[in-house]
């Protein structure tokens, strides 16, 4: 075949890819920015665009899902006692409209009677998790995006093996992409001891399960249905402070909201294994353990109606009157969050962002910096932490509303990943997070409009490229 014929054949294939793929992108009904980004990518680089769309752009998701009303029916007495009147929360100075929205998003709302312990040091967090595992009597449920087969990964695995040998039920669910380094052989001792290990949305190219989107980014541990852990820490040396400098946040929680953590795990486990865990054995009677009002919100691509975490954060920022302080490792906001931050700052609200100065995902870092000029001009203050990777994801508003969990302030967390955040209503947790935030900002370098004017042309090009791809990140 001559070179001319090969050229015409490649051109024909290019056209076929463009003609067939662009209608598929349009029919997905994404946000306009993401749709246009995919169309431009497919037109400019059809072959690579086809491969990228196959891996990152497919949105088909078939999940086993239990209906929430069935869960409520099975546990009606226990759940009813937890749903205390929201009127009691007004003493915390929270806008009534925000509380109504919070209840609407999961039909439960904030729950009273919780005790929270925050961990900024990974070693302390994993010590607490291991201590809870060692004291377990009935079951241990774990859900992680990343589980590394390193020292910390082996240490926690071995603690689970010992729990199994005492007769404790152990169920571990890991994301198949995030935990790709910890293959089945790594968990063989746990499985032999009686533990159950499942992988969330396993990658299988033969069944077209190749998408790297729709990953389970949650980090949840529930012990005996009474003690829970969640936050930003995956399982690995880096999160335990045994590797490169890494700054994270995790929480131990006991009280009524542990039922919500358990429910999230049970739903994800049901999808992965078809095993229904909704019974009183895993949802014991909740007791009053403290005075913190808390709510667990889970969001993901399988949500039929609301992007719960994104929706509540957007509303809270717009209702802020004094301050909005955000700590996030990955900042790629959608237009609604950008507008909320700008208008809050223009209204005189003290809006601050704490971001990394360098990142394990450079493209995401450049994409996020492309938004800085606009929000700095509105009065938002931006701080970059030097020499350390801040991986915590927190928001505090007006000293009475706060959140921590797995969701970054980016479009991937809001649209594409399965996430889970704890929200706190009242001053106690918000005050702790604000003190941590101020301490970190004191060691960070503030980014100003003046300093932004001195960045190189090459840096601006990298930011511009990241901005084009922002809807896909």
Image (cartoon, rainbow, N blue to C red):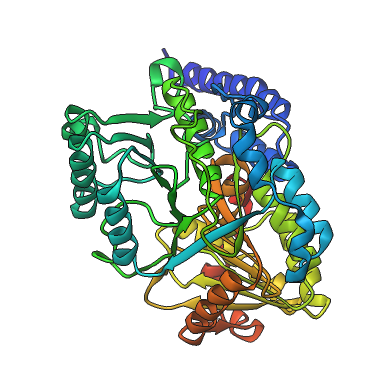
Residue depicted at 78% across the width and 71% down the height: 344
Q: Residue furthest top?
A: 1
Residue 291: x and y in percent read 59, 65
Is 170 left, or right, of 166 in this rendering?
A: right
49 w.r.t. 442: above or below: above
Snapshot quadrant of residue 397: bottom right
Looking at the image, residue 69 lies above or below residue 130: above
Q: Quadrant of residue 448?
A: bottom right
Q: Nearer the viewer, residue 376 or 397?
A: 397
Residue 236 is situated, as x and y percent measured from the top left of the image, at 28, 54
Give the side of residue 242 with respect to residue 37, left or right. Answer: left
Toward which corner of the image does residue 41 lie, by quadrant? Answer: top right
Residue 458's place in the image compared with 447, above or below, is: above
Which quarter shows the N terminus? top left
Q: Is residue 223 above or below residue 442?
A: above
Q: Is residue 460 left or right of residue 191?
A: right
- Residue drawn at (81%, 76%) of the image: 346
Query: In terms of depth relative to the viewer, which is nearer, 230 or 417?
Result: 230
| Residue 344 in view in this figure | yes
Residue in the picture at 56% in, 52% down: 421
| Residue 293 position in % (x across, y down) | 63, 60
């Amino acid at each position: 075949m001559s070179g001319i014929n090969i050229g015409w054949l490649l051109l024909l294939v290019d056209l076929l890819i463009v003609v067939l793929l662009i209608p598929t992108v349009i029919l997905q009904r994404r946000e306009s920015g993401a749709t246009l980004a995919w169309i431009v990518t497919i037109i400019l680089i059809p072959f690579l665009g086809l491969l990228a769309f196959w891996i990152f752009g497919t949105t088909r998701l078939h999940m086993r899902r239990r209906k929430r009303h069935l869960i409520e029916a099975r546990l009606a007495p226990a759940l009813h006692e937890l749903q205390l009147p929201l009127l009691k929360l007004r003493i915390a100075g929270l806008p009534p409209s925000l509380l109504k929205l919070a209840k609407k998003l999961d039909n439960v709302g904030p729950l009273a009677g919780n005790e929270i312990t925050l961990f900024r040091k990974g070693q302390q967090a994993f010590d607490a998790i291991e201590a809870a595992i060692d004291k377990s009597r009935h079951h241990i449920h774990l859900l992680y995006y990343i589980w590394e087969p390193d020292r910390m990964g082996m240490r926690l695995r071995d603690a689970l093996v010992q729990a199994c040998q005492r007769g404790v039920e152990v169920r571990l669910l890991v994301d198949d992409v995030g935990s790709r380094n910890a293959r089945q052989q790594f968990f063989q001792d746990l499985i032999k001891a009686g533990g159950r290990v499942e992988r969330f949305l396993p990658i299988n190219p033969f069944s077209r399960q190749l998408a790297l989107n729709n990953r389970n980014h949650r980090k949840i541990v529930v012990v005996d249905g009474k003690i829970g852990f969640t936050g930003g820490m995956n399982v690995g040396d880096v999160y335990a402070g045994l590797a490169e400098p890494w700054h994270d946040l995790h929480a131990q929680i006991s009280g009524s909201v542990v039922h919500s953590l358990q429910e999230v795990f049970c739903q994800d486990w049901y999808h992965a294994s078809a095993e229904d865990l909704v019974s009183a054995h895993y949802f014991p009677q909740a007791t009053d353990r403290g005075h913190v009002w808390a709510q667990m919100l889970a969001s993901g691509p399988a949500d039929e109606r609301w992007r719960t975490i994104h929706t509540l954060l957007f509303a809270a920022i717009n209702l802020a009157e004094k301050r909005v302080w955000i700590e996030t490792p990955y900042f790629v906001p959608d237009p609604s969050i950008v507008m909320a931050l700008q208008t809050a700052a223009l209204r005189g609200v003290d809006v601050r962002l704490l971001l990394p100065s360098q990142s394990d995902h450079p493209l995401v870092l450049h994409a996020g910096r492309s938004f800085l000029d606009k929000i700095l001009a509105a009065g938002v203050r931006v701080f970059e932490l030097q020499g350390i990777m801040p991986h915590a994801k927190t928001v505090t508003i007006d000293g009475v509303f706060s959140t921590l969990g797995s969701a970054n302030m980016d479009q991937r967390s809001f649209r594409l990943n399965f996430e889970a955040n704890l929200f706190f209503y009242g001053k106690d947790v918000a005050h702790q997070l604000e003190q941590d935030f101020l301490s970190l900002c004191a060691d960070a370098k503030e980014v100003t409009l003046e300093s932004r004017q001195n960045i190189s042309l090459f840096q601006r090009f990298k930011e511009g490229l990241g901005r084009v791809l922002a809807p896909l990140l």
